[in-house]
Amino acid sequence: MPAEKRKANSAAGLLLAATLLLPTGAGASIIFQSATLGTTDGPSVVIENDSTFEFALGVRFQVTSTVQVTGIGGGVWSLTQRELFGELFALSGPADLPSGDPLNSDPLALVSFVAPTSLQDFSVPLSITLTPGYYGLVFGAYPSGSVGGVIGPEASGLMTIDGSDLPGTDASSYFEYAATTIQVSPGQGPQCRVAGRRIRQRALRGRRRRRARTRKFRSRAGSFGFADGTPVRPFPALTGKGVKRSR
């Protein structure tokens, strides 16, 4: 999908996404988090997209039960409130990578937001249901022309990389899109987070219980009979042969 079309599709929700940066503790649990939050004066990578270079950063993670995602976030910020985007991609396995330019691909979900001007723990609203499997979370930037044609780090997003990896994440979990190539990006510390809740399959379990009770009842009903072993004969149909009909 062209970048212009994808940006237009997300423009309607941009103001809402930009103004509703929610703290992690706003009623959502953490489904996945790659690392702890780094420090403002620590090392950072630049999330950019200008006329000469595009760079996006992502992380792979696994979902073991069906979940309802309510937001994504992490240690992403910008000195000039740059317009960034976050995406979720489905992966075929733990070693798979998204294919192609993140800005011109078809992700499972996309959200645009204006990054905060300081490093903080935040989450931007994003709603999607994920089933068990492997996924990639990517943060990238729209072309610099979207912020008045300014080109350079001052118009880009930043991700600190001096946090500590959490269990389940290691150097091979991270990947990057640089220029035209997407590849594993060995390193540690960029905090990427998916917030939401686990979906409890109560309705499905309820249907299974009702079916089990129905099978049990039918099994018992089929064993009814007289004490001498003579089975119970079914009632004749009202319109069956040998039934006298009323006039």
Image (cartoon, rainbow, N blue to C red):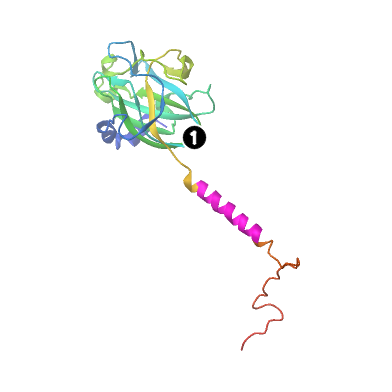
**Total tally of numbered discs in the picture:** 1
Q: Is residue 159 above or below residue 220?
A: above
Q: Residue furthest bottom?
A: 247
The image quadrant that residue 128 belongs to is: top left
Alpha-carbon neighbours of circle 1 within 10 Å: few (<14), some, or many (≥20)? few
The residue nearer to you, when weighing 158 against 25, is: 25
The residue nearer to you, when weighing 5 against 90, is: 90
Please report the residue visible at 41 percent of the width from the left and 14 percent of the height from the top.
Answer: 188
Quadrant showing the N terminus? top left
Identify the residue under disc 1.
Answer: 65
In the rendering, at what x and y percent does residue 136 appear? 45, 26
* Magenta-tinted stretch: 204-220
Please report the residue visible at 76 percent of the width from the left and 67 percent of the height from the top.
Answer: 228
In the rendering, at what x and y percent does residue 220 appear? 65, 59
From the image, give the main secondary structure of the stretch colored magenta: helix
Q: Is residue 152 visible?
A: no
Q: Secondary structure at mark 1?
A: loop
The residue nearer to you, when weighing 224 against 123, is: 224
Q: Is residue 27 magenta?
A: no
Q: Is residue 67 above or below residue 155?
A: below
Q: Is residue 108 above or below residue 142?
A: below
Q: Is residue 211 magenta?
A: yes
In the rendering, at what x and y percent does residue 212 appear? 59, 52
The amino acid type, in three-letter code, at marker 1 is Ser
Q: Is residue 120 visible?
A: yes
In the rendering, at what x and y percent does residue 13 appear? 30, 36
Quadrant showing the C terminus? bottom right
